[in-house]
Amino acid sequence: RIVFELGRAAPAQSRVEQSGSDSRLVLHLGARAGSTSVVEAPAVALERAIANLQPVEMPAVESPPPQPVETRQVWAAPANVPTLPASPDVAIENSPRQSSAFRAPTRTVRDVIGSGQRKLIVAIDAGHGGKDPGAHGPSGVREKAVTLAVARELARQIDADPGMRAVLIRDGDSFVPLQARYMKARRAQADLFISIHADASPNHTASGASVYVLSTRGASSQAARWLADQENAADLVGGVSLDHKDHNLAAVLLDLSQSATMRASDDIANQVLGSLKNVGKAHKPSIERANFVVLRSPDVPSMLIETGFITNPSEEQRLNDPGYRTRLATAISEGVRRYFTDQPPPGSWYASRDDLRPSSRTHVVGRGETLSLIAARHGVGVDRIREANRRQGDSVQIGESLTIPLMASAPK
């Protein structure tokens, strides 16, 4: 995310320059007649932010006159979610609905970063609910009850962490439309969205947890909808209003935000899947991708967790056990905590704790990634990654775990 804070409104113009496989976004801010003042986004910073800015295919349009740049960004701190114990059985779905606050007095980004103690907001979505029971197991355990129990326990653990605060999308047996779920997370200014589910299959022997992130195709179609939907024009995407923006500039800003969001989703999902493997077997060895509606937020890292197969008799019984659900919630919260420790957002409580910073992090190789792309993404040299992993060549395999050094190399 790139934010320009100006003392006054200024006209803005932009263009994307292509040079071979490299792309550069050039912004003109406050340029007067005859002035050549230009603010360019550094190539390295852009590479770290979006890894590889892809050309945006757009029909030719006539640009409207430049409009003032909207630079004020706010962050809303929602109230704490009530601490609720996990219910021991399917009776959880009959618990009274609790109200959750999604609005609070706002503070400017400068105020928040200055305090250095911002709590990161984790929106937790218990899948299904109300008239939508979800799947059910052989003995009648319903998915909507399991997901709510896990979500409540996860919220309790998140709220117990000094650097995080939980927001429950639903806290009772209520039906929430799919799009409204991630929109609630955006209104809460969430730093992370987690949707909890239980899997189902005609094959009753299918087992194991899964973690999903948004597919590239799903992201592309959602971006097109955001740009076409006038109701979204005045909304903030990555802290920037798309209202009154040149169409091409709006497309580039959305692509920047969405690309960074998807990479963050991948990183968090890999951490969570690694933790879940300590609780039980995973259904697949790596994270999966799908076009789930709840994962379509353009600026909130999101993942959907299938906690196990409720249609498997053995897993149904485990999912109905409070102790096992607590272990699931603990694994999820530990994965989230590791990510925020490794990559703390500026101004957050985690960013203020240098004593928590590890000397390295783990990167799980995804489809289409190369060693040089991974190095650019983490802001380290390829040689340092080779050295940390005791390897000579540059070849990597999907699903392979690499150690990424974070601390500066010792002088030689």
Image (cartoon, rainbow, N blue to C red):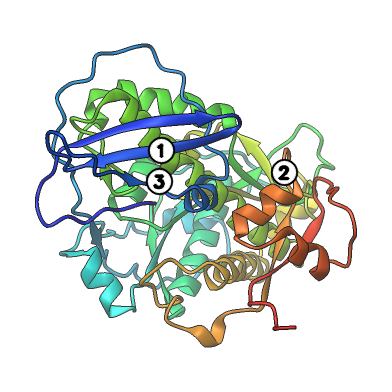
Q: Mark 2 sits on what residue? A: 369
- Camera-nearest residue between 388 and 152: 388
Between disc 2 and disc 1, whose residue precedes? 1
Amino acid of disc 2: Glu
The reply to whether dot 3 and dot 1 touch (C-beta < 8 Å) is no
* Element assignment for label 2: loop
Q: Mark 1 sits on what residue? A: 25
Quarter holding the C terminus?
Answer: bottom right
Which marked residue is nearer to the observer: mark 3 or mark 1? 1
* Element assignment for label 3: loop
Most extreme residue toward the left is: 8
Q: Mark 3 sits on what residue? A: 299
**Residue 347 on image: x %, y %:** 35, 72
**Residue 3 on image: x %, y %:** 30, 53
Can see residue 150?
yes
Q: CA distance from mark 2 to mark 3?
A: 22 Å
The residue drawn where x is 47% and y is 64% is 152
The residue drawn where x is 45% and y is 79% is 160
- Camera-nearest residue between 342 and 250: 250
- Is residue 400 placed above or below 294 in the rendered structure? below
Which marked residue is nearer to the observer: mark 2 or mark 1? 1
When asked about the image quadrant of residue 27, the answer is top left
Graded by Cα atoms within 10 Å as few (under 14), some (14 to 19) or many (20 or more), the crowding at tag 1 reads: some
Most extreme residue toward the bottom is: 355
- Is residue 306 placed above or below 54 in the rendered structure? below
The residue drawn where x is 79% and y is 54% is 314
Q: CA distance from mark 3 to mark 1?
A: 19 Å
